[in-house]
Image: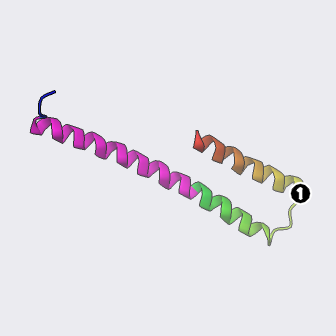
Amino acid sequence: MGQMTQEEINVALFDEGQRLRQEIRRIKKEKERYRNALEQIAKMEKARTAPELVICKYARYAREALEAAE
């Protein structure tokens, strides 16, 4: 393989930058999801909810976390 031209280098750097921006967006979204789940759990100490509702909330957060991990 020969050396890359400056244009090829620029394109490769741009593509890598795009990929990194997408990864940062994904990580921020995941961080927000976990933060929201933790806030809900923290609020549960004050809430008077039925155990079934609590289980449903945990199940929903678990499903979202598992889907995000795929």
Tell whether 33 sits left or right of 60.
left
- Residue at image position (59%, 44%) is 68
Decide whether the magenta segment is chiefly helix, strand or loop: helix
Q: Position of residue 53 (x, y in %)?
A: 84, 54
Q: Is residue 58 above or below residue 40?
A: above
Considering every residue shown, the one lying at the far top of the view is 1
Of residues 49 and 27, which is closer to you in this image? 27
Tell whether 6 sits left or right of 70.
left
Number of numbered markers: 1
Q: Looking at the picture, which amino acid does disc 1 mark?
A: Pro
Tell whether 1 sits left or right of 41.
left
The residue stretch that appears in magenta: 5-32
- Residue at image position (29%, 46%) is 17
- Per the image, the residue denoted by label 1 is 51
Of residues 62 and 54, which is closer to you in this image? 62
- Residue at image position (63%, 60%) is 36
**Residue 16 found in image quarter:** top left
Q: Is mark 1 on a helix, strand or loop?
A: helix
Q: Position of residue 1 (x, y in %)?
A: 16, 27
Whether residue 22 appears in magenta in the rendering, the answer is yes
Q: Position of residue 34 (x, y in %)?
A: 61, 57
Picture quarter with the C terminus: top right
